[in-house]
Amino acid sequence: MSRLVTAPIPGLVRELAIPASTGFFFNTMYNVVDTWYGGRYSTEALAALSLTFPVFFLLISTGSGFSTGATALIGNSLGRGDRREAALTASQGILLSVIVALLMMLLGYYTAPAMYQLLGATDQYLQLCLDYLNIILLGCGFTFTFYMFNGILNSLGDTKAFRNYLLGATIANIILDPIFMYGWIGLPAMGVKGIALATVLAQAGGMVFLGRRTWHTGLLHRSEGARWTPDARVMRAITAQGIPASLNMVSMALGVFVITYFLAEFGQDVVAAYGAATRIEQIVLMPALGLNVAALSLAAQNGGAGRLDRVRELAKICLRYGGIVMAFGTVLLYFGAEFLMGLFTPDPQVIETGAHYLRIAAFLEFSYVILFVNTSILQGLKKPEFALWIGVYRQLVMPIGLFWLSMHVFDWGLDGIWWSIFGINWSASLIAAYYALRKVASLEKEGA
């Protein structure tokens, strides 16, 4: 029997979460490097990267969502001791990721210009956005495939491989961004196109590195049960788990679109400030985000083994660790807001706007831990639908209503946007905790 269903939960959470957190840190630092170079290039370039991020995140969300679905199914199969079904799911997940990548590439090319124009991008601003995105779309097959490889590894409790790749990718990005952007060592200066090209090359490297690691697990071997022709049953199962998870993450991207749409009324400086501030938030959340991976992997295998008592313990341990870590994050954001913003831009107006938001966000970070841990546990138990509905509530329904009211009815200005974000996310986290508790109790009764 897998040690993920026998070893003590606290030790397993630390074993999985710490490498995953480190990996998330380097993933965010990878994006931070892009933002930093973009800010040094020009405020317009920084705003273009901020505006492009939701579309880029949309691609990542789809790939990561299908990866999450595969992790849940493979983990459940391993928890039941059915390795052949796990291998079949892993191979079909790789095939499915290639198909989805092609579809997303075509969708991005045809819809991105209209989306950017809706958000107020015109002329040179629009062209900068498209210059970046068109290159990113060429590499989305690498993105989808390496996320699926990572999902397979996570189902086995391997969170170190992704960390190691991201460490290497971040170092490569620090080197390649200025070379491509400014045209060093005889290359033509490519501006934001160079930032995008560095990202695509790093993702190609990630696909090769994680692919080799996954192959060595044996789950992609025909002798273990892998099948490299499409199997409709398994693809439907992965899709049923992956689409809600993807749509939940897509709702996050759409949520950034919604926020950006309303912030655009306050000017390009505010959009740039929010883009830099959210990167800072991501860094602060990194130590806790690894808990999501631990929660998903452990809930999947323990749910498959029928050990729901361990799933309850898992939730408590993850929230306890997350609370400790986020206490430090709150202090850092509140007292270091101006300094942190100053690392991304020299523009005093952008710094002031972003710092004000960060002081409010300082007391919001633990709500994300509650929300994401409980959602990950539900996904691990093959109950992904809640993630979609809470995502729609948190990213679309409530923001559109509250932002419009705060700006056009109550005239609360920019503070109305910031405090609406605060209230929406805390309410969503409490709903998630209550629902997950009820669902685990229901599953325990069904298995009794």
Image (spheres, rainbow, N blue to C red):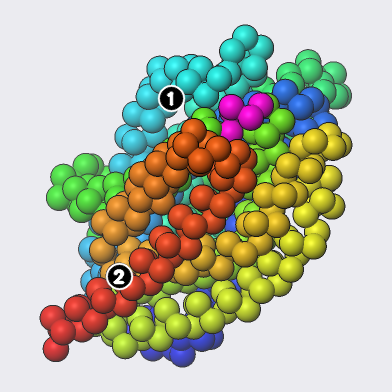
- Tag 2 residue: 435
What residue is at 55 percent from the left and 37 percent from the top? 411
User: Can you give x and y, in whole percent of width and height, for residue 383 in the image?
Assistant: 26, 63
Q: Amino acid at mark 1?
A: Gly
Q: Which mark is residue 108?
A: 1
Q: Could you tell which of marks 1 and 2 lies nearer the N-terminus?
A: 1
Q: Quadrant of residue 342?
A: top right
Q: Secondary structure at mark 2?
A: helix
Q: Give the answer, above or below, for where 420 lies relative to 328.
A: above
**220 in magenta:** no
- Look at the image and tell me whether residue 268 can be seen: yes
Residue 105 or residue 327, whichever sits in front:
327
User: Can you give x and y, in whole percent of width and height, for residue 439 in the image?
Assistant: 25, 74
State how far apart marks 1 and 2 are (Cα): 35 Å
Q: Amino acid at mark 2?
A: Tyr
In the image, the segment drawn in magenta is 263-267
Q: Quadrant of residue 95?
A: top left
Side (left or right) of 93 relative to 202: left
Q: Give the answer, above or below, for where 121 lies relative to 56.
A: above
Q: Give the main secondary structure, helix, strand or loop, of the magenta stretch.
A: helix
Q: Quadrant of residue 125?
A: top right
